[in-house]
């Protein structure tokens, strides 16, 4: 019988740290990564020698960036693993670290996501190097794909561009409360709609900025928490972890939502949870329509109902379920490698009651969701008594 994370020994997030997500600067990736790791260690109240394995996730940097980062903390000889899985790189790293601690192989793991776009241009997707050309490659880039989905959603459910743009209003408002966010300015609906056009009804303020940054978390077993005297207000248990890749769907026009639905259902079942029990959700909203579609795909509301709930404040901090209280990818930003583990850190803060101005009152159950170029999806649940 296949085991789940909950069948193994409990694992906890005990520390989280960031280097602010920001536009490209002269800051080195080493400085970015070290800031996040040191922040996570300080938050957990432990020293680097207590870490037994390090998982470093990146999508834009050259090979093996973890070594020049972590050597500044000491050459301790620990296992060092690098993971690339597109936007879900650090979500994948987090899952593997949780499994390693839950299995009993180690007691303490570090997960670091760090990225910095190259000034010579992005590394790009391997699909473009297969020698098999796609006639639509130059016509349907990601923002075009999601603009078409936004139009499809509007036609099916009677929504309009203003409705979908309200996602950006909410998330820019949340990002303005987050000192680690790429975008930290409240925006009105008029400002969102009046931004520079990108595709369809999308403007730049409805799309994620891709910059640089880093995020890190410390994962520990109960044995390590006792042995290292980690403060009792820090641990947040990871109760579910699920990962799936894209398959052929009956309606393949919206494979991201189909993949999200399947992966979320698996994770919630593993954790013994229902969608209505979720207090906080951090989800992949590279484009505004994604949030609308994914809350429906996750079962947080009925199909076609997301917009009216958005307008009523249901997805606000303090509403029915706080969706993207960090600001989401739209305002928190999307440096690629750090994004998934940054979501985990945000949920840990929320469940500890330590999220400051963006705290969702009484949050006890959270979910993190990331999609990687539509090919993979990761969903994790975290809980605190």
Image (spheres, grey):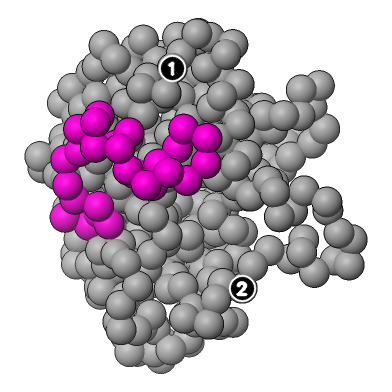
Residue under numbered circle 2 = 123
> Label 2 neighbourhood size at 10 Å, few (<14), some (14-19), many (20+)?
few
Question: How far from the left and from the top, in percent, is residue 275?
Answer: 45, 18
Q: Residue 215, position in %: x, y?
A: 34, 62
Q: Which residue is located at x 54 percent, y 54 percent?
A: 87
**In front here: 249 or 57?**
249
Q: Which stretch appears magenta?
A: 178-205
In the rendered view, does 145 fall on the left or right side of 229?
right
| SS label for mark 1 | loop
Compared to 66, does 311 lie above or below? above
User: How far separated are the C-alphas under marks 2 and 1?
Assistant: 36 Å
Question: From the viewer's perspective, is the residue at label 2 or at label 1 nearer?
Answer: 1
Residue 26 x/y as whole percent = 30, 84
Identity of the residue drawn at 60% across and 65% down = 84
Pointer 1: residues within 10 angstroms few (<14), some, or many (20+)?
some
Q: Is residue 179 magenta?
A: yes
Quarter where residue 247 is shown: top right
Q: Is residue 317 above or below residue 71?
A: above
Helix, strand or loop status at disc 2: loop
Residue placed at 32% from the left, 43% from the top? Answer: 195
Looking at the image, which residue sits at the far right? 132
Q: Is residue 186 visible?
A: yes
Instruction: Give yes or no for residue 129 being in the magenta stretch.
Output: no
């Amino acid at each position: 019988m296949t085991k789940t994370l909950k069948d193994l020994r409990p694992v906890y997030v005990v520390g989280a740290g960031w280097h602010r997500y920001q536009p490209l600067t002269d800051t080195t990736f080493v400085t970015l990564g070290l800031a996040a790791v040191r922040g996570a260690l300080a938050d957990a109240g432990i020293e680097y020698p207590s870490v037994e394995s390090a998982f470093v996730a990146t999508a834009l940097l050259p090979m093996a960036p973890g070594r020049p980062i972590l050597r500044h903390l000491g050459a301790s000889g620990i296992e060092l693993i690098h993971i690339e899985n597109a936007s879900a790189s650090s979500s994948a790293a987090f899952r593997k670290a949780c499994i390693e601690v839950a299995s009993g192989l180690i007691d303490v793991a570090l997960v670091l996501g760090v990225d910095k776009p190259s000034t010579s241009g992005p590394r790009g997707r391997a699909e473009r190097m297969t020698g098999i050309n796609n006639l639509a490659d130059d016509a349907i880039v990601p923002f075009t794909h999601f603009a078409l989905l936004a139009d499809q959603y509007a036609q099916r459910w009677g929504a309009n561009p203003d409705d979908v743009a309200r996602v950006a209003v909410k998330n820019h408002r949340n990002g303005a409360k987050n000192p680690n966010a790429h975008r930290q300015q409240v925006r009105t609906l008029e400002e969102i709609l009046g931004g520079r056009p990108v595709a369809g009804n999308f403007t730049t303020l409805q799309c994620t900025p891709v910059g640089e940054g880093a995020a890190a978390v410390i994962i520990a077993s109960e044995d390590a928490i006792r042995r290292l005297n980690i403060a009792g207000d820090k641990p947040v248990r990871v109760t579910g972890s699920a990962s799936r890749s894209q398959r052929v769907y009956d309606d393949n026009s919206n494979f991201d939502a189909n993949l999200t639905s399947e992966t979320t259902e698996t994770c919630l079942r593993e954790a013994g949870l229902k969608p209505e029990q979720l207090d906080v959700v951090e989800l992949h909203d590279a484009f505004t329509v994604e949030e609308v579609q994914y809350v429906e795909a996750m079962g947080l509301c009925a199909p076609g109902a997301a917009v009216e709930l958005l307008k009523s404040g249901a997805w606000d901090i303090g509403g029915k379920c706080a969706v993207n209280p960090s600001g989401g990818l739209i305002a928190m930003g999307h440096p690629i490698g750090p994004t998934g583990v940054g979501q985990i850190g945000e949920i840990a803060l929320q469940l500890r009651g330590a999220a400051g101005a963006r705290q969702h009152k009484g949050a006890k159950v959270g979910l993190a969701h990331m999609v990687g170029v539509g090919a993979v999806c990761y969903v994790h649940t975290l809980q605190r008594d």
